[in-house]
């Protein structure tokens, strides 16, 4: 069996709402149902997450701050021993809101910023003034004493701007810069021809990004793509091989459905009705994801034991088969 945490997921990514005030052309959740769980149901679900042995929870969406009771939910999760974090577009965070986030138990907040150029970011996020508000959010969060990070979706608008993104992160005193590879889920699939890179362009990006990462001090740069193993880096610091979804983490949708990750729209159960530990250990889909069968060029690839076919979400979105090679893989057929 391939490696994964046997007892419980390390973290849960929870889209507490699908409401959003932005119009991003790559959004994976815009087509999801907008049903939300009542706060008392959320509390019971958090208790079951804690009982299962999960250590941390990350709230997202949508824009999580559009859920009016988010602070109450965070306080409850924090009081029950979970490390609580959030991903936000930053548009609703001012000084008072940052202080409230700190008081309600958040340990860190990630802000989405895809370019240091305001016009580029605003166009990508479909909302004028979004860059300025994201920068304001970082300043307010830092002033409130919260750990901050920047998440950048790497695609055609910014794949050549590695140095500028790093300089921007350092200037704004964040601890982590996350380079998220473009996924082809939701609206990302509809707009992939306009936004996604070719396989060879991904190779070029990762070579440059890894070089920049090695040269940068005082900033943790994260590259969350298993196909980096093709560059001879093995697991690249990850606790597991291949995709981490279904091995280190799970995703909960706004209506309580559980999926392997936010980019895989295959429901394995419900946080309301099902036992999380049982799903984690016995879900047929998770078992398949942890025990993939190499197909196509993967079958003869010397890096497969570390890469395990690359990103499972992309393979499903573009080929319909979890065992097929990641379409971003630049290795040519033998």
Image (tube, rainbow, N blue to C red):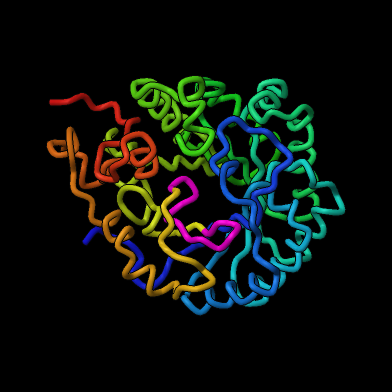
Pick the quarter of the image with the C terminus: top left
128 lies left or right of 242? right
At 59% from the left and 40% from the top, the residue drawn is 151
Task: Tell me, yes or no, whether the highlighted magenta stretch contains residue 263.
Answer: yes
In the rendering, at what x and y percent does residue 82 appear? Answer: 59, 70
At 51% from the left and 30% from the top, the residue drawn is 154
Position of residue 270 relative to residue 220, above or below, is below
Q: How many marks?
A: 0
324 lies left or right of 255? left
Q: Which image quadrant for residue 327?
A: top left
Where are the magenta residues, as a range? 252-264
At 41% from the left and 61% from the top, the residue drawn is 268
Give whichever of 146, 242 is nearer the camera: 242
Q: Which image quadrant for residue 36?
A: bottom right
Give whichever of 238, 153 is nearer the camera: 153
Task: Tell me, yes or no, whether the highlighted magenta stretch contains residue 228.
Answer: no
At 18% from the left and 43% from the top, the residue drawn is 294
- Residue 297 appearing in the image: yes
Q: What predominant SS class does the magenta segment belong to?
A: loop
In the rendering, at what x and y percent does residue 180 appear? Answer: 50, 38
In the rendering, at what x and y percent does residue 44 appear? Answer: 61, 77
- Residue 218 appearing in the image: no
205 lies left or right of 297? right
204 lies left or right of 156? left
In the rendering, at what x and y percent does residue 76 appear? Answer: 69, 73
Pick the quarter of the image with the N terminus: bottom left
Q: Which image quadrant for residue 278?
A: bottom left
């Amino acid at each position: 069996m391939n490696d994964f945490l046997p007892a419980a997921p390390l973290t849960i990514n929870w889209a507490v709402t699908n409401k959003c005030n932005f119009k991003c052309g790559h959004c994976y959740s815009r087509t999801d149902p907008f049903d939300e769980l009542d706060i008392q149901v959320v509390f019971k679900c958090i208790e079951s997450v804690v009982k299962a042995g999960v250590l941390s929870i990350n709230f997202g969406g949508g824009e999580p701050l559009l859920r009016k009771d988010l602070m109450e939910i965070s306080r409850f999760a924090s009081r029950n021993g979970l490390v609580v974090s959030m991903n936000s577009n930053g548009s609703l965070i001012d000084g008072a809101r940052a202080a409230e986030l700190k008081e309600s138990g958040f340990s860190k907040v990630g802000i989405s910023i895809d370019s240091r150029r305001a016009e580029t970011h605003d166009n990508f996020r479909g909302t004028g003034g979004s860059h300025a508000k994201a920068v304001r959010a970082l300043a307010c969060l830092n002033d409130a004493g919260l750990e901050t990070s920047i998440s950048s979706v790497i695609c055609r608008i910014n794949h050549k701007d590695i140095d500028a993104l790093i300089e921007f992160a350092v200037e704004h005193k964040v601890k982590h810069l996350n380079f998220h590879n473009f996924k082809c889920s939701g609206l990302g699939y509809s707009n992939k021809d306009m936004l996604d890179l070719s396989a060879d362009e991904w190779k070029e990006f990762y070579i440059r990004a890894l070089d920049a990462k090695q040269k940068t001090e005082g900033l943790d740069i994260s590259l969350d793509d298993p196909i980096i193993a093709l560059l001879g880096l093995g697991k690249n610091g990850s606790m597991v091989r291949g995709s981490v979804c279904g091995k280190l983490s799970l995703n909960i949708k706004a209506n309580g459905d559980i999926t392997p990750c936010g980019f895989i729209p295959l429901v394995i159960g419900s946080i309301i009705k099902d036992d999380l530990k049982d799903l984690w250990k016995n879900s047929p889909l998770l078992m398949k994801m942890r025990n993939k069968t190499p197909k196509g060029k993967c079958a003869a690839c010397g890096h497969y034991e570390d890469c395990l076919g690359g990103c499972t979400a992309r393979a499903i979105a573009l080929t319909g088969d979890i065992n097929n090679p990641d379409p971003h893989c630049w290795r040519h057929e033998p």
